[in-house]
Image (tube, grey):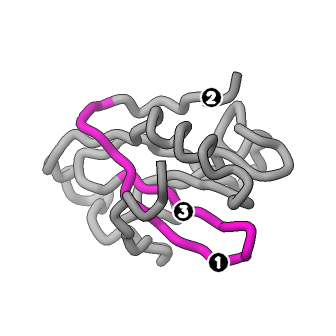
Amino acid sequence: MRFQDLVPIELNTIEASTVYRADKPRPKQHDWQLDWERLRQLILDNSERLDEVKAGIAEDWVRTHGTIWDRTRGFYRQPNDHYDYDDTVFWGYSSWGTPAISVIFADETEASYQLYRDGMDYNYHYLGQ
């Protein structure tokens, strides 16, 4: 699998969500979950070109992303593995946002892509052996 086959996406990295607000009901636009199978294959096929891969919801990236894989540790068993009190909570499903990945390549360039399929699985999946 190649990164050129994915659709680029811009991540919302501001502190406030552009879609969800606590004082309003959560919008229901679709049922999209992270495509774990494609994510695993993408990492395995391109690991020599990668430094780090994170996943989360593009429209609320700051509060929803977590590290999935990095060059040093490989696949993480949990998002961000060891939690500090201020770590974000990983989301792999959204009824209003777009599940996405952010990639730091070995040449230090960065890119973000949509990576979802229909479904409602919000759980984190360990992708290692």
Q: Look at the numbered disc 1 and give the secondary structure of its residue.
A: loop
Residue for point 63% across, 52% down: 46
Q: CA distance from mark 1 to mark 3?
A: 11 Å
In the displayed structure, 85 sits above or below 82; it is below
Q: Is residue 123 left or right of residue 48?
A: left
How crowded pointer 3 is (Cα within 10 Å; few <14, some 14-19, many 20+) is rated as many
**Which of the image's four quarters has the C terminus?**
top right
How crowded pointer 1 is (Cα within 10 Å; few <14, some 14-19, many 20+) is rated as few
Residue for point 55% across, 37% down: 40
Q: Is residue 75 left or right of residue 63?
A: right
Residue for point 43% across, 41% down: 92
How crowded pointer 2 is (Cα within 10 Å; few <14, some 14-19, many 20+) is rated as some
The one nearer the camera, 9 or 44, is 44
Q: Name the chief secondary structure element in magenta.
A: strand
Q: Which residue is mark 1?
A: 109
Q: Which mark is residue 102?
A: 3
Of labels 2 and 1, the one closer to you: 1
Residue type of the residue flagged with mark 3: Ser
Q: CA distance from mark 3 to mark 2?
A: 17 Å
Q: Is residue 111 left or right of residue 77?
A: left
Residue 85 lies within the magenta run: no
Residue 104 lies within the magenta run: yes
Q: Which residue is mark 2?
A: 126
In the displayed structure, 78 sits above or below 85; it is above
Q: Look at the numbered disc 2 and give the secondary structure of its residue.
A: loop
Residue type of the residue flagged with mark 2: Tyr
Q: Earlier in the sequence, mark 3 or mark 2?
A: 3
In the displayed structure, 39 sits above or below 104; it is above
Q: Earlier in the sequence, mark 2 or mark 1?
A: 1
Q: Look at the numbered disc 3 and give the secondary structure of its residue.
A: strand
Which portion, as a residue range, is magenta?
99-120
Q: Are marks 1 and 3 in contact (CB under 8 Å)?
A: no
